[in-house]
């Protein structure tokens, strides 16, 4: 039996979203599924396995440890390490057959020498900074950089990429400028007869709104999980949420006027009230700033959080919920009956982005995988 606070991951929705993205980009464009940050909280191995089974060409991770974890779980697909690397990590990158991003000549030279030492050919992708301002070789220096890489032994230039900084905004001028800069780099490489097969730029926002950024491969992350990066992005792609956070009522108490609820006596009862305790809190990834502001769904009815969100529990007013009882299932993010609470709506409430809400669901919350194709639910543990 799993803990009575859990995340349901709808694998059927994940398949649906992947198919929607494939339809959007067409059959000639490859997909790199972004599974960094534990697949945005959805479970790296389970998500990776499904994506690879359904035609994703490679996977994107952020840090070395994510690659080691996937390799140790049996994932053999190409893994692009999107984050910056340190010299002392190079041997491990080679050992686990990861694809590092290259953006610094000195580091690339060391990578080449270590690859020679191990008698390996290391596949690399060049990261070009077209205006994000993060790691990456500047776009106006990228052609010369790649020419220098081309002469290094034991490195194989498998890909070149850049990253959109604001493709989720309706105003497209800056994204168009980034696309133009990247095209100039590619044209410069073509002019000196350097052909790099995988050319990628589009994150979820650009997949949906900037088809001229698709190139030969795209990198969906948030859209795979059925979420939109902002309210300004078109909804016509037709994705649906994969994650549903649930818990159960652990206790119900009838409280009188002048009673108080939770730490700091933050909520004072003003009239007879039924208060339910839920066994989840901020260590499960539910933001403490939702104290007195958040809502959940019980028996198809929304109920408000009262008092402060604790580390391991929180409290809700269920006076208006007919028949609520200990053990009832409660939806924190997701749908129950005719009501829903989307991750995007919680992000708006907290003045943040959906990425943070999904990623913040902590690892102590078990993931339960619901596979509509097989008609079963299972937990990897």
Image: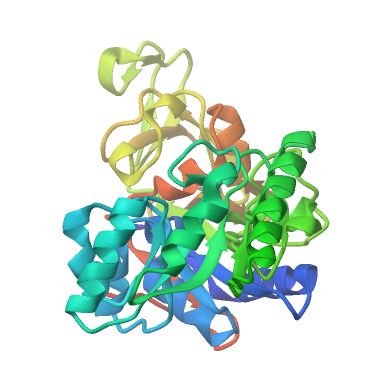
Q: Position of residue 52 (x, y in %)?
A: 51, 82
Colouring used for the render: rainbow
Q: Position of residue 88 (x, y in %)?
A: 16, 57
The quarter of the displayed image where residue 4 is located = bottom left
Quadrant containing the C terminus is: bottom left
Residue 291 seen in this snapshot: yes
Q: In this view, does 88 lie above or below 93?
A: above
Q: As drawn, is 56 to the left or to the right of 137?
A: right
Q: As drawn, is 109 to the left or to the right of 28?
A: left
Quadrant containing the N terminus is: bottom left
Residue 126 seen in this snapshot: no
Name the residue at 20% across, 60% down: 89
Front one among 332 and 157 = 157
Name the residue at 21% across, 55% down: 87
Front one among 351 and 272 = 351
The quarter of the displayed image where residue 156 is located = bottom left
Name the residue at 60% across, 75% down: 197
Q: In this view, does 213 lie above or below 343?
A: below
Front one among 82 and 261 = 82
Name the residue at 31% across, 68% down: 67
Q: As drawn, is 3 to the left or to the right of 17?
A: left
In the displayed orientation, state which residue is furthest to the right: 236
Report the label total: 0
Q: Position of residue 378 (x, y in %)?
A: 40, 79
Q: Position of residue 331 (x, y in %)?
A: 51, 51
Q: In this view, does 52 lie above or below 125?
A: below
């Amino acid at each position: 039996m799993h803990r009575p606070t859990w995340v349901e991951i709808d694998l059927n929705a994940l398949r649906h979203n992947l198919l929607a993205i494939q339809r959007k980009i067409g059959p000639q464009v490859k997909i790199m599924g972004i599974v960094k940050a534990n697949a945005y909280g959805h479970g790296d191995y389970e998500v990776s396995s499904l994506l690879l089974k359904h035609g994703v060409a490679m996977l994107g991770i952020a840090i070395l440890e994510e690659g080691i974890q996937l390799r140790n779980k049996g994932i053999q697909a190409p893994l692009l390490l999107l984050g910056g690397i340190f010299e002392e990590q190079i041997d491990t990158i080679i050992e686990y057959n990861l694809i590092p991003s290259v953006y610094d000549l000195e580091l690339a030279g060391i990578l080449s020498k270590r690859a020679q030492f191990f008698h390996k050919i290391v596949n690399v992708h060049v990261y070009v900074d077209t205006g994000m301002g993060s790691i990456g070789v500047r776009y106006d220096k990228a052609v010369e950089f790649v020419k220098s890489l081309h002469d290094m032994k034991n490195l194989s230039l498998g890909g070149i990429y850049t990253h959109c900084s604001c493709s989720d905004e309706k105003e497209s001028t800056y994204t168009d400028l980034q696309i133009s800069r990247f095209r100039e780099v590619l044209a410069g490489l073509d002019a000196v007869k350097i052909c790099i097969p995988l050319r990628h730029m589009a994150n979820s926002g650009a997949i949906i709104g900037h088809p001229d950024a698709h190139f030969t491969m795209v990198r969906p992350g948030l859209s795979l999980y059925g979420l939109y990066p902002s309210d300004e992005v078109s909804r016509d792609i037709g994705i649906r949420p994969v994650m549903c956070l649930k818990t159960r009522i652990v206790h119900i108490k009838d409280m009188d006027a002048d009673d108080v609820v939770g730490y700091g006596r933050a909520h004072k009862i003003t009239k007879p009230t039924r208060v339910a305790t839920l066994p989840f809190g901020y260590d499960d990834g539910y933001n403490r700033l939702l104290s007195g502001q958040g809502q959940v769904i019980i028996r198809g009815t929304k109920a408000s959080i009262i008092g402060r969100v604790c580390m391991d529990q929180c409290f809700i007013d269920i006076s208006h919920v007919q028949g609520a009882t200990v053990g009832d299932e409660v939806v924190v993010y997701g749908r129950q009956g005719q009501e829903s609470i989307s991750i995007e709506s919680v992000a708006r409430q907290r003045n943040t982005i959906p990425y943070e809400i999904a990623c913040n669901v902590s690892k102590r919350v078990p993931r339960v995988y619901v596979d509509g194709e097989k008609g079963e639910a299972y937990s990897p543990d």
